Amino acid sequence: MGGNAIKIDYDRCIGCEKCYDFCPMDVYIWDNDNKVPSVAYEEECYFCGICFMECPKRAIDITFPASMW
Amino acid sequence: MSQKIANKVVETDVLVIGGGIVGCTAAWKAAEHGLNVALIEKSKPERSGKTGQGMDEIGIFPGRDGVTTLDALNLYLGGRGPSSLRAANRVLDPNVLYKIFDNALWALDEMERMGISMRYVDGEFGWMPYGSYPNGEPGPLIELRVHWHNVKPEMASAIRKNGIKVFERTMVVDLLTNNGIVVGATAVNTRTAEFITFKAKAIVLGTGDFSRHYNPSPPPCWKYKMAYNNCPASAAGDGHAVAFRAGADITRTETMQPAIVRDEILLQPGQFYLNDGITAKTFNWKGEEISRPEGPLEYLQYFNKGMVPLYQTLEHLPDDFQKRLEIHIMDETPLRLKLHGDRGFNPGKHWYQVAGNRGSHVLSGGIVIDEYFQTTLKGVYAGGECSEACGIGAGGALTAGMSIGENIHRYVSTAPEPVIDKAMVEHQKRTALAPLSVKDGTVPMELECSIRSICEEFAGPIKTEGMLREGLRRLSSLKRAFLPKLMAINPHYLMRCMEVRNILDLAEVHFKTALERKETRSGSSKSQFIRLDYPENDPSLDNKHFCVRMENGKTMIVAKEVPELNQEYAKEKN
């Protein structure tokens, strides 16, 4: 979606699915081929930080984009 | 997609809709009584609802320095409770509130039995004063400071252990009724679009508040990005809408909580005012200390004098407060520490803006319940933010949930075997799944943004008849033109389409009931209901509330008398 608020570091991601599993807004989809999450509906993110804190490898970073400043 | 969809039927004694505090506690307690319980949740109970990311304090409890349930009730209704109910003085059934206060300590024990961490430090409860008087002195009610960062994983584990069948990523479509009683509900899986029919003797609604008819902060702009203080998935009014459409009364749909504070970095107002009885100082932009605006009218006075923006600060508080503030934020919204850091913002030292004319547009009403948390539709129970006893927070929610779980088996044991009307199921299925087959239609968020801008412009915190009529006209024409064109390219967007349908129904109800209440409630700046064309309080409406329900597709609004406090409760207990 061209968003820049949620960044996934795929080098760190271990494919545990926690972000995909817990996101209350269902922002993530699961890429079954590569066993990694992908951000599909970033515009629905409300910055609760559940994925950020559940990620066991700190592979997700969340920053405020310009539209939220 | 459509060819994959088959009807799945689930039979259960109790169907709980919503996996937040109310849903989990009600389900857990009902299962303790041996009932067969299913729970549907739009996301996953481990991290869903208002407390999904955590919670730092729960309230409200009577009891400090000999404050009895009745004292608490009088204090609450008499003007020292949270603004959402204070202004609604005498339009909430006092018996409901009485039961919430009276059962609060019992519910607390039940929470511990459920395995939820309730102790603060060294195995002790973290009691603290709830709110403060304008002079900063702590009030007589109390609340509980908790480290509830992981309350939802704890609750989810408790309900799964108790054998509750949890349906994740499942959203309610509508309730099923037969001869005036509830017999189940229909739902859709939001990742597969599987349509599920639940056959149930009783239903519990614990779906959260309704606030998505107004703009969050900041308003949607690029790609609709927006900041909410609470989870928008639990603010779509799903429970309100399904109850309303099934013929249950909902009330106080014209009112909303007055706006108080917003900061662009998503500070939670509660963290500053309530916890530890700490009060922030308020200043105008010139740096002159002023009293905090309690609502939109008071803010408007500052605005008219050119004194805005207004700011608040905690810089006068001792240094150790900085650490305590950090712990509060860690308990409730840990990401915010990081976002503060990114912007170089220090919540203990820097000023933050008070936006008094907008902010919290949460509906301060909900589904009508009696003191047993039963709605006006037989077999349906409701509690927490979606019920009329909203605005009490997690403490009110857990007490409601535990009480429902305690009461519901009595109803279930006498309820008739539910008989499902197949035509009703088919109708609900067609309505719910229709957006999947619409091509070149309207995406749900576009329609939702349109509803919001109409509500912002024509209703808002300060209302007049002409603006309300025009807004209602626009909403109704929007509904006619675009509801049938709602398009879902996948099950995820189908969920958003179903939410928009709920939001649209409730936004209309909001306008219709706001037109009916031709007065300004409480007549002061603390009002949550302001009509510029009727600036006075109408005493004839003092103990009346507008109950709204749908009957044969028509919206029925009836002004009903609010019950008096039961004589037995009115007698002081010692």
Image (spheres, coloured by chain):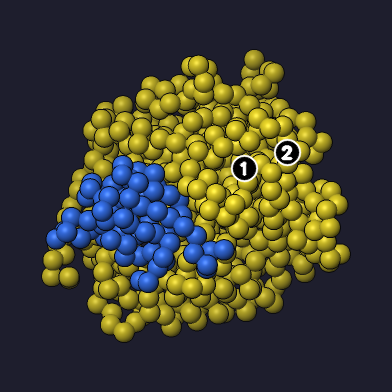
Letter of the chain shown yellow in the rendering: B
Chain at tag 1: B
Chain A colour is blue
Neighbours of disc 1 within 10 Å: few (<14), some (14-19), many (20+) = few
Q: Secondary structure at mark 2?
A: loop
- In the rendered image, residue B524, in percent from the top left (x then y), is placed at 80, 53
Relative vertical location of residue B505 with respect to residue B206 in this rendering, above or below? below
- In the rendered image, residue B207, in percent from the top left (x then y), is placed at 42, 49
> In the figure, residue B154 lies in which quadrant?
top left
Residue at 60% x, 37% y is B325
- Which residue in the protein does label 1 denote? B270
Relative vertical location of residue B43 with respect to residue B487 in this rendering, above or below? above
The amino acid type found where label 2 is placed reads Thr
The amino acid type found where label 1 is placed reads Gly
Which is more toward the observer, B317 or A18?
A: B317
Question: Does B221 sit left or right of A2 as displayed?
Answer: right
Residue B229 visible, this orientation: no
> In the figure, residue B509 lies in which quadrant?
bottom right
Question: Does B84 sit left or right of B337 as displayed?
Answer: right
Q: Secondary structure at mark 1?
A: helix
Pointer 1 and pointer 2 on the same chain: yes
Q: Please tell me the numbered disc located at residue B279.
A: 2
